[in-house]
Amino acid sequence: MELSAEQAAVRDLVREFAIEEVRPLAREADRTQTFPEGVWDGLANIDLTGLTVPEEYGGYDADRLTYAVVNEQLAYGMLAVATALSVHCLVTTCIAEFGDRPLRERWLPEMVDGRPVGAFALSEPDAGSNPAEMTTAARREGDEYVLNGKKQWVTNGERAGVVVVFAKTDRDDPGSVTQFLVPKDADGLSVDKKEDKLGLRASDTTALLFDDVRIPAENRLTAEGRGLSAALSVLTGGRIGIAAQAVGLAAAALDEAIDYAGEREQFGRPIGEFQAIRHSRHDAGEPAAAAASMAKYFAGEGAVDVAGEAVQIHGGYGYTTDVPVERFYRDAKVTTIYEGTTEIQKKVIARELLD
Ligand SMILES: Cc1cc2nc3c(=O)[nH]c(=O)nc-3n(C[C@H](O)[C@H](O)[C@H](O)COP(=O)(O)OP(=O)(O)OC[C@H]3O[C@@H](n4cnc5c(N)ncnc54)[C@H](O)[C@@H]3O)c2cc1C
């Protein structure tokens, strides 16, 4: 799809930022499992922390294509940064779409400025692909809700200042899932185990514990029982972002492999001249299919393949932390897991095609 002049300008700006400001920090951030907060400040400076926020709250109000382009370019620099931003954007989208005016006014302008960072707590230890099995409960008491339970795999879990939380107003009713906005400093809310992950190591993924967390009833974002359909609707947009991230990561891996294949000599010539290496020059990503699930499925699996080939082209050096392709290889895998695994995307696609 052709980009407009404005979309192309955004792409160029973010690409330059990714190459100049993000990529040089990726190796160390991965090694120390530390999110580069200076990069977050930089994202705020170029208005990306308000990417999907309506203009009346100071945001950029990006269309879907711009959103995808930003995700692609940031992932070219570091997937962990693109992931953190996409989750922050999920949260601002929930507040903008489902929150009433006082909530929007309270949170969105600050989030546009970069902090508080947002987190999105849907998954639980025993409820991943099927969130309807969640057990986190929200009990109404007067003009408050009281939340109890445990959320798992929360991206930005440590860094966040505000969390969109899904909980059942009736634990025995799978149809009672409701969406709430919970300030991270609420009494009874604590950060539990931080995951020590295969890839995406600069992104903080934590559990969150809710122990009699009281929030005002105004912080309910959806009507009781409407939380899951709201979650699935914002996740459709989220999946487009993840698909774009997978393409950006694959492009970075491909570029590294092409450079290396041109430089590395064996048998007296660059390895890129050998037929077997030429076969490995996959396209970094096919055009995204119309459906978000198809795009995520295709791009995620494609990124894993391309990153694997990039390691292969680097030979033994590709298996060391001296080169970025080993990180691309580790990071790529998560794009086939989070925001719905490959198998779940196939289920969605089959359902749409067959029903
Ligand atoms: C790094 C990272 C960050 C994440 N960030 C967030 C976040 O910010 N917020 C959040 O809420 N969640 C987040 N997640 C959770 C993520 O969305 C879940 O891990 C994912 O939905 C899968 O759930 P699960 O891990 O419980 O696996 P399970 O659901 O237990 O799946 C295990 C396996 O079974 C397969 N499977 C399950 N059901 C079916 C089926 N019906 N048909 C075929 N196969 C099936 C799956 O595809 C998978 O291969 C994150 C996960 C990771 C790894």
Image (spheres, grey):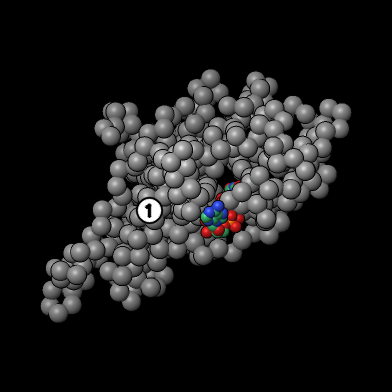
Count of labels in the image: 1
Quarter of the render that holds ligand 1: bottom right
Instruction: Describe the element under mark 1 as helix, strand or loop.
Output: helix
Placement of the N terminus among the 4 image quadrants: top left
Q: Which amino acid does label 1 sit on?
A: Leu
Task: Establish if 57 lies above or below 120.
Answer: above
Does residue 53 appear left or right of residue 160 in this picture?
left
* Within-10-Å neighbours for mark 1: few <14, some 14–19, many 20+: many
Does residue 59 appear left or right of residue 103 in this picture?
left
Task: List x then y, in percent, for residue 310.
Answer: 31, 64
Task: Please give the name of the residue rendered at 48% of the width and 56% of the height, measured from the top-left corner.
Answer: 334
Name the one closer to the observer, 123 or 10. 123
Name the one closer to the observer, 61 or 296. 296
The residue that disc 1 covers is 249
Task: Establish if 42 lies above or below 255.
Answer: above
Task: List x then y, in percent, for residue 214.
Answer: 81, 38
